[in-house]
Amino acid sequence: MDKPADDLSECHEMVEQLQEEKKELLEENDQLRESADTFGELAERLNHALGEERQSGETPPAIVPASAERRT
C-alpha cells in the first residue's frame, strides 16, 4: 500500500468531517442567536407591561411558584 496516499485520503476524510461539523455548529449558533433575540424581545415586552402596571397603580396578580402549585 501507498502510505502517503493513505495519509492523504485520511486527511481529506477528516477535512470533510470537520467541514460538516462546522456547518452544523454554525446552524446551531444561528438558532441560539435567534432564540436569544426572541427571549430578549419577550423580556422587553414583559418589562414594559410591568412598568405600565406600576404607573397605573394596578395590583399585579400574585405570582405563585410552580413548585407551590404542585403541592396544592
Image (cartoon, rainbow, N blue to C red):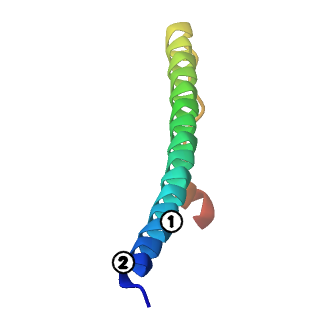
Q: Nearer the viewer, residue 13 or 70?
A: 13
Q: Look at mark 1 in the image and give the residue it sits on.
A: 17
- Determine the residue positioned at 51% across, 65% down: 17
Question: Dot 2: within a 10 Å radius of its alpha carbon, few (fewer than 14), some, or many (20 or more) residues?
Answer: few
Mark 2 against mark 1, which lies toward the viewer? 2
Q: Please name the amino acid that badge 2 sits on.
A: Pro
**Residue tagged by mark 2?**
4
| Quarter of the image that includes the C terminus | bottom right
Residue depicted at x 50% and y 70%: 13
Element on which disc 2 rests: helix
Q: Residue extending furthest bottom?
A: 1
Residue at 53% x, 30% y is 37
Residue 60 can be seen in this image: yes
Residue 10, placed above or below residue 70: below
N-terminal of the two: label 2 or label 1? 2
Which residue type carries mark 1?
Gln
| Viewer can see residue 72 | no
> In x, y percent, where is residue 66?
57, 55
Foreground pick, 48 / 5? 5
Q: Quadrant of residue 30?
A: top right
Q: Quadrant of the N terminus?
A: bottom left
